[in-house]
Amino acid sequence: MKNFKLLSFYGCLTVYYFFFWRENIGINLFIFNLLLLSLSFIYLPKTYKTFALLVVGILSSLAVVLVNSDFSIIINLLVMSIVLGYAALPSINSAVSGGLAFAVRLLLSFRYITEPISQLFENFAPRNVLLSKVLKGLKISIIPVILFIIFLIIFQNANPVFEEKTIFLKDIITLFFEKFPSFSIQRTLYTFFGFIILNAIFFKHEIGFARDFLTNKEVKLYRETASKSTNLYLTAFSTMVLLNILLFFVNMIDIEYLWLNLEGTTAPQMSKLVHSGTYLLIFSILLSIIVLIFFFKGELNFHKNQKRLALLSFLWIGQNVLLLISVFIRNYKYIEMYGLTRKRIGVGVFLIITLIGLITMTLKIYKKLNLRYILISNSWALMALGLLLSFINFDAIIAENNLKRPDCDLNYVKSLSVRVLPVIKKYHPDFKDEEMVFLKLYKSDQEKYTWLSWNFADYQFNQFLNTTKP
């Protein structure tokens, strides 16, 4: 099994070396992730959680092939870090813990940077005194040499006199790089980066100091002592009463002027409502969640009048949901007036995340759960939401929505992506391809890529370009 892991490491490093160098992200990432997930599955417990996370990893990789947006790639990297963190520590308690477990392993891989090389010598070379000395020398010298070269380059660029005195060292290093077969600094750094990541995946560096935080699944609050803090209860109760009254008037004003009589709102007023009001109201909702977390973090959950406080808190949460709807209406109406942008979609996504937070906060108070529950439930929910959104081509939706408008900002649409050209042509048949700033660069890049960079989004776009050639 030890030899198999070592072979898996060098096999994956070889695949990484050839699959991603000067290639675009596409089917290469899907194949590579599938390879990593398959090899990880061998060592994992065969539970529903394992199968669910493997499916999530595969779906996220598939989204990259189908949509191939920056967002889908970022989500895939986050999802894979969670899944690989789970592979390193199957007892993780949340998606955040999975990501942190992988991050810790990644940091530890720098400490154990020579482990794959050591095991290679130990397994495939005869053990003798000379070999042991060479191996020990490599272990001791590799990090000092790397750091020496890095700081030499820094100091030479920072101090011309020092560069003049040490130019011979630069010449020696350059000569070595030039004469080494098919060697380049960029590809060496690229390979080293893959070496570090795969070292973190395949070689088990024990996570000791953070294990309890990453694996503790206890979410229930328990009464330690009967709550006798009347002052704290009165503070919480009076705070909830005052905030409910205040928010009630805010919501009534929003319902009257925003929900029912929005037609009379001028464009400048709407702009202020969205740009200033939206972010302040989102902040107020987040602040509300923090206030509730503070009051319900401990003993007040077991106070004799806890039910009264809980009812006021549920009323406060319900009013925050109404406020959230008001923010959504502001954003939606602003989109109707001025069109769709990535930032306005981001506001909508953030509202969904905030709603999830309000729901989990309600359950925390009702079931007397601790803060760990908030972390665990919200992290899994966010991972699921990110996975779902990674299958959506937001640039195409923005372009389609805005180009229907007579006052469309065509320059903004053009700045989204070269792939929105088919949508532009749909509404502006006379639009010249040359007006797409990065189209020429896109075409030249496509000529350099191999089948490893294939993805469905580029395939569709290339088909469009081929069928619309003059």
Image: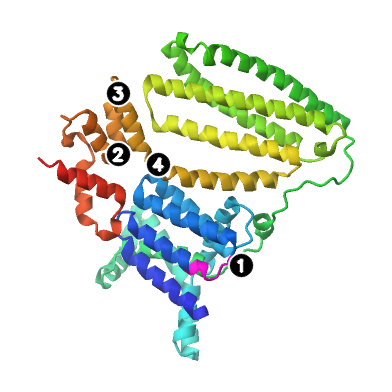
Residue 341 x %, y %:
38, 30
Q: Residues within 10 Å of mark 1 (few under 14, many from 20)?
A: few
Q: Is residue 337 left or right of residue 286?
A: left
Marks 1 and 3 close (CB-CB < 8 Å): no
Q: Which residue is mark 4?
A: 392
Q: Residues within 10 Å of mark 2 (few under 14, many from 20)?
A: some
- Tag nearer the camera, 1 or 3: 3
Quarter placement of the C terminus: top left
Tell me which numbered mark, 1 or 4, is placed earlier along the sequence.
1
Identified by mark 3, the residue type is Cys
Q: Which residue is mark 2?
A: 417
What's the CA distance linking mark 4 and mark 2? 14 Å
Range drawn in magenta: 39-46
Residue 51 x %, y %:
54, 60
What's the CA distance linking mark 1 and mark 3? 56 Å
SS under mark 4? loop
Does the magenta stretch mainly form a helix, a strand or a loop?
Answer: loop
Tell me which numbered mark, 3 or 2, is placed earlier along the sequence.
3
Tell me which numbered mark, 1 or 3, is placed earlier along the sequence.
1
User: For the view shown, which residue lies furthest in the left direction?
Assistant: 470
Tell me which numbered mark, 3 or 4, is placed earlier along the sequence.
4
